[in-house]
Image: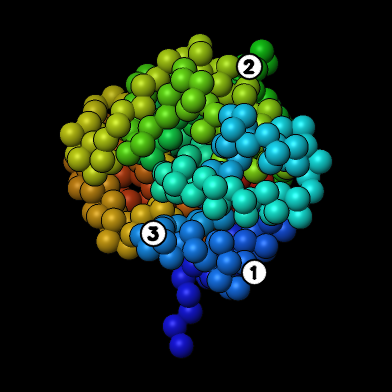
Amino acid sequence: MIADPVVRRFEAQVEAFAAMGSALYARVTMRLLADYRARGVTYEFFSDVPTRAALSTPGVRLLGALHYLALSGEAPALAMHLPSCGGDGDADAIWEIAQELLVEREEQIGALFAQTPQTNEVARSTVLLAGLCAVAQETQCPIRLFEIGASAGLNSRLDRYRYEGEGWSWGDENSPLVLRNRIRSGMPSLIERLDITERAACDLQPLDVASPQDRMRLLSFVWADQAERFARLRAAFEVAQTLPLTVERADMFSWLVERVAPKAGTATVVMHSVMTEHLTKDDRARLTATITGIAERAGDEAPFALTRMEFAPEPRAYETSVTLWPGARRRLIARSDGHAQGIAWIA
């Protein structure tokens, strides 16, 4: 008997929510899963539009859609129970109201559900910064930064944030955003100053931090019981006002081919984080081939690097790594969870 892919994805989401500190979302997703198995309103939501069953992360998508309605004032009864809206965090009450909304607002929730999750978790900047520092240290060149799957481009602004850990710190002491990730072991290897001379970014569905609606969309994907993440994201919005960056609406494959090429005297870096899990197997292979094609033009005077934070099945953690050309030398920077917490820095 073939397992239902929706069930598998919901089960994985329950595990992920619990592991990454959202007990509330884990409990609500368990209710969604039980209702789906009982062929309730959740099952009808997927069976009414079969293409929904093929989309990744159903828990993140559904709860993000419901959260958006609460944050925007369209679902005040739900907002009363979401901590992000000042609510009491009652998972049972959230589920009762969610059932009604899935029936009454099915079309609206379906439209929100279909949009690719846009978390743009800025805590990931900590491990990405270490990756860029490794490139700069190895090449002794300034950085040209090109981020794909960039959402609102908040991680493209990583050099404008403040980072603090036990025994170390980096960046502008006056930055509105101070990142203090949970560290499991080790310390990052950072250079004193990171020189980014050019930055560009693309996404299929980019969000503009200057837009109140897009800011709301970003906030909706923050798990409603995680106050620190809300504070970080709002601080990142403030930083973004000081460094405008247009995230281009583009297919990353054509964008990479058209926009990215090694350039003498600089280290050209392609960066992405928690993006490949939303791609098909064929698109992941296509991305690898596209990156390899760019790398073939790298040279000693025009180095090229890939800095990435993506899930590794073994050891079931998110790995941040740098691959540098010429030579395709790979260096593992850190392992962490998907929000760059519980970091194990690799010496």
Taking the image as drawn, is residue 182 in sight? yes
Residue at (67% x, 62% y) in the render: 31
Task: Give whichever of discs 3 and 1 has the lower sequence position.
Answer: 1
Q: Please, is residue 301 above or below residue 42 in the view?
A: above
Q: What residue is pinned by disc 1?
A: 34
Residue 263 falls in image quadrant: top left
Q: How crowded is mark 2: few (under 14 residues within 10 Å), some or many (20 or more)?
A: some
State the CA–CA distance, disc 3 to disc 1. 20 Å
Q: Which of marks 3 and 1 is in front?
A: 3
Residue 230 x/y as whole percent: 66, 32
Q: Residues within 10 Å of mark 3 (few under 14, many from 20)?
A: few
Q: Which of marks 3 and 2 is in front?
A: 3
Q: What residue is pinned by disc 2?
A: 175
Element assignment for label 3: loop
Residue 190 x/y as whole percent: 57, 32
Q: Which mark is residue 49?
A: 3
Residue at (47% x, 35% y) in the render: 132
Q: In this view, does 81 lie to the left or right of 179?
A: right
Q: Which mark is residue 21?
A: none
State the CA–CA distance, disc 1 to disc 2. 45 Å
In the image, 49 versus 170, the foreground residue is: 49
Q: Is residue 102 left or right of residue 174?
A: left
Residue 79 falls in image quadrant: top right
Task: Give whichever of discs 3 and 2 has the lower sequence position.
Answer: 3
Element assignment for label 1: helix
Q: Which residue type does callout 1 highlight? A: Ala
Q: Please, is residue 25 above or below residue 202 in the view?
A: below
In the image, 342 versus 55, the foreground residue is: 55
Q: How crowded is mark 1: few (under 14 residues within 10 Å), some or many (20 or more)?
A: some
Residue at (71% x, 32% y) in the render: 85
- In the picture as drawn, the residue positioned furthest to the front comes out as 104
